Image (spheres, grey):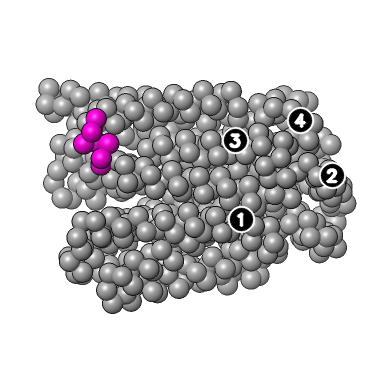
């Protein structure tokens, strides 16, 4: 089952890039809709005279919706297919964008934000899943990574849109503009093919074959088709159940990474970076915007670095190096807060360590988590298993968002960042001990590994097995 570079399943037509880019609009919306509220809320709060608890609710409504969307979308992604789930999520995104933009009061706004959240929950895992299933193995990291690049760009664009519409208190525009990428996603996806692997799962081999020919740019797709079919036959033997012994180790890896991705604090920084910069003593109002933009740009730039490296150096090295950088960044950040007042130079140290932290996340846990959960599960349960990891991710995101300010009150700022650093060390050990290396393997080869009953960590990069 080893592929050489002359293997057609390793090649790709230009069309595969187009299909991946269209699906990645799901990532763009994920980023835009989570980022946009940070600026919009300032105006919404005033216009609707929101109490602080209502304000918190409006901000976290998306997370609540996302947990629900990710939970509900799993079996549907297996039943209706990844393509339809993206089309449905685009429709929900559009309704949410228009609904929130026109909301006459706080309750309809809250409802609209939950609707947007549901769409984010669905798109957050179906976009990587779709891309992973159409991508040739040797560039799967790059193509799935496009989704995270779109996500981080979406966050950055939302900050810029917030900035642009601030002078006219234009929160309705900020929220409503998401309708443009939403409609584009929905319409463009209608012209994209279904996932060939999902088609094989449905017994539609002929259609799968024609999709493969289109996205591989060759007529020779028989071998790939056969391998996908063989994988399914193995699962039909009954051992491929979601909670069964074959899937369980991969499930632990996905859910563990999902939780670590959030409890190492990334969204504390994404959602509260102006507050953190203020803590560090940089407190003119323009600094808040600048802070968000600097964080956003760093996130985008290092995501580009990651997706260029991920198919060459592999997933594990990026995770391990990224986590190390995050831990160092968090440790220094805590120290800068602990020693604050000693010198104004420490402000710059705080900003620098925050950048190191964001860059390190963008190199590792950010893109690699979503990539791995789209590749490590057997086809028969791929939708449900990916959705489970996604629910864990959004659930942990919600807990951290609610807990951050309380945590700062309870153990102080240095303590909070050191706590995240400690968790980061735990995450490093978890990755080192348990996470498989999927680089260069076809999804069927990864599946075969579980069927042999081997532990996740024994799956090594393709080059190493050769
Ligand atoms: C995470 C999000 C986070 C984003 C930041 C994603 O991989 O799942 O929670 O906001 O990265 O870039």
* Mark 4 / mark 1, whichever is N-terminal: 1
Query: Observer-nearest residue: 161 or 255?
Result: 255
At horizontal 14% and vertical 43% (from top left) the residue drawn is 283
Q: Position of residue 356 (x, y in %)?
A: 36, 31
Which residues lie in the magenta part? 405-411
Q: CA distance from mark 4 to mark 2?
A: 14 Å
Horizontal side of residue 226 vs 259, given as left or right? right
Residue contact between numbered discs 2 and 1, judged by CB atoms under 8 Å = no
* Mark 1 / mark 3, whichever is N-terminal: 1
SS for tag 3? Answer: helix
Q: Quadrant of residue 424?
A: top left
Q: Point out the image quarter for the C terminus.
A: top right
Which residue is labeled 1 in the image? 74
* Mark 2 / mark 3, whichever is N-terminal: 2
Q: Quadrant of residue 300?
A: top left
Is 408 a magenta residue? yes
Which residue is labeled 2 in the image? 237
* Neighbourhood count class around disc 1 (C-alpha, 10 Å): few under 14, some 14–19, many 20 upward: many
Residue contact between numbered discs 2 and 3, judged by CB atoms under 8 Å = no
Quick check: 380 above or below 246?
below
* Mark 4 / mark 2, whichever is N-terminal: 2
Q: Residue 453, which numbered label?
A: 4
* Neighbourhood count class around disc 4 (C-alpha, 10 Å): few under 14, some 14–19, many 20 upward: few
At horizontal 46% and vertical 56% (from top left) the residue drawn is 66
Q: CA distance from mark 2 to mark 1?
A: 22 Å
* Neighbourhood count class around disc 3 (C-alpha, 10 Å): few under 14, some 14–19, many 20 upward: some
* Mark 2 / mark 1, whichever is N-terminal: 1
Q: Position of residue 100 (x, y in %)?
A: 35, 71
SS for tag 4? Answer: loop
Which residue is labeled 3 in the image? 252
């Amino acid at each position: 089952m080893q592929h050489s570079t002359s293997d057609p399943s390793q090649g790709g037509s230009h069309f595969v890039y187009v299909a991946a880019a269209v699906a990645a609009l799901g990532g763009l919306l994920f980023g835009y809709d989570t980022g946009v509220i940070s600026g919009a809320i300032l105006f919404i709060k005033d216009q609707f005279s929101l109490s602080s608890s209502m304000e918190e609710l409006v901000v976290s409504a998306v997370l609540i919706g996302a947990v629900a969307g990710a939970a509900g979308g799993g079996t549907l992604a297996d039943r209706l297919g990844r393509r339809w789930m993206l089309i449905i999520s685009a429709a929900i995104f559009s309704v949410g964008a228009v609904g929130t933009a026109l909301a006459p009061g706080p309750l309809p706004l809250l409802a609209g934000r939950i609707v947007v959240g549901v769409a984010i929950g669905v798109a957050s895992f179906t976009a990587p899943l779709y891309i992973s299933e159409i991508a040739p193995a040797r560039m799967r990291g790059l193509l799935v990574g496009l989704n995270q690049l779109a996500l981080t760009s979406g966050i950055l664009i939302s900050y810029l849109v917030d900035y642009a519409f601030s002078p006219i208190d234009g929160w309705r525009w900020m929220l409503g503009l998401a309708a443009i990428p939403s409609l584009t996603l929905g319409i463009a996806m209608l012209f994209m093919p279904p996932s060939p692997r999902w088609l094989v799962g449905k017994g539609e081999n002929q259609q799968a074959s024609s999709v493969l020919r289109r996205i591989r740019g060759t007529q020779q797709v028989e071998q790939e088709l056969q391998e996908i079919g063989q994988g399914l036959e193995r699962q039909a033997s009954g051992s491929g159940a979601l909670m069964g012994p074959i899937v369980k180790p991969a499930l632990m890896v996905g859910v563990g990474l999902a939780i670590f991705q959030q409890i190492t604090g990334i969204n504390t920084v994404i959602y509260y970076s102006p507050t953190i910069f203020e803590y560090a003593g940089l407190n003119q109002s323009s600094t808040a915007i600048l802070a968000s933009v600097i964080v956003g740009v760093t996130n985008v730039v290092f995501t580009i670095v990651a997706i260029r490296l991920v198919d060459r150096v592999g997933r594990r090295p990026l995770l391990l190096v990224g986590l190390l950088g995050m831990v160092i960044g968090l440790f220094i950040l805590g120290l800068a807060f602990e020693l604050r007042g000693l010198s104004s130079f420490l402000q710059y140290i705080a900003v620098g360590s925050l950048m190191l932290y964001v860059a390190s996340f963008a190199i590792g846990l950010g893109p690699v988590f979503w990539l791995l959960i789209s590749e490590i599960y057997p086809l028969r349960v791929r939708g449900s298993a990916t959705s489970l990891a996604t629910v864990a991710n959004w659930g942990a995101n919600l807990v951290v968002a609610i807990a951050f300010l309380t945590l700062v009150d309870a153990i102080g700022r240095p303590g909070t960042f050191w706590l995240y650093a400690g968790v980061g060390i735990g995450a490093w050990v978890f990755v080192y001990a348990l996470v498989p290396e999927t680089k260069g393997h076809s999804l069927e080869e990864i599946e075969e590994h579980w069927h042999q009953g081997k532990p996740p960590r024994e799956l090594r990069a393709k080059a190493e097995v050769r």
